[in-house]
Image: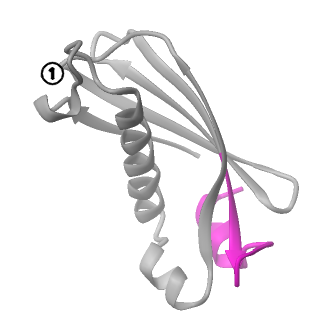
Amino acid sequence: MSFSLNFEVRDYECDLQGIVNNAVYQNYLEHARHKFLQSVGLDFAQLHHEGIDPVVYRIEIDYKKSLKSGDLFSITLLVEREGNLKFIFNQSIFKNNNELVLKAKVIAVFTANGKPIVPPQKVIDALAI
């Protein structure tokens, strides 16, 4: 299942070099994942209330270009499943001229009481995997 979300760089997200700080990109990626999950009917707060928490297991990021204040960009997301426990969020950031800024592979698992679990069927169904 694929997903896309548009953004604009805000001044305070940039460092002294005038480019987006590398840590801010992880905020962008996380926000896009949360919006994606909402778009397929999954609610973090409700899942937590049910004792289920999705957590990031690993992130790999390849930085290609820098974003600057005022840049318009989009984040694309494609989710796939690896085995019973891991969900792979392949995310890319593109400037509005379709120039690749960043590629990321975010591996997430669902947990209950701090231990990885096979997610409930409603999660698997929502992610259409």
**For residue 99, above or below residue 45:** above
Q: Please give the range of residues in magenta.
A: 107-129
- The x and y percentages for residue 60 are 64, 32
Looking at the rendering, which quadrant does residue 128 occupy? bottom right
Looking at the rendering, which quadrant does residue 95 occupy? top left
The single residue placed furthest to the bottom in the displayed view is 50
Task: Tell me: 92 left or right of 17.
Answer: right
Residue nearer the viewer, 111 or 94: 111
- The residue to which callout 1 is attached is 69
Q: What residue is shown at x 27% (from left), y 35% (from top)?
A: 6
Q: Quadrant of the C terminus?
A: bottom right
Q: Would you say residue 114 sits in the magenta stretch?
A: yes
- The x and y percentages for residue 38 are 41, 64
Task: Tell me: 92 left or right of 16.
Answer: right
The single residue placed furthest to the right in the displayed view is 83
Q: What residue is shown at x 19% (from left), y 19% (from top)?
A: 71
Task: Tell me: 68 left or right of 47.
Answer: left
Q: What residue is shown at x 12% (from left), y 22% (from top)?
A: 70
**For residue 128, above or below residue 125:** above
Whether residue 43 is visible here, answered yes or no, is: no
Whether residue 5 is visible here, answered yes or no, is: yes
- The x and y percentages for residue 5 are 34, 40
Residue nearer the viewer, 78 or 27: 27
Q: Secondary structure at mark 1?
A: loop
Residue nearer the viewer, 126 or 43: 43
Q: Would you say residue 72 sits in the magenta stretch?
A: no
Numbered circles on residues, count: 1
- The x and y percentages for residue 45 are 43, 80
Label 1 is placed on what type of residue? Ser
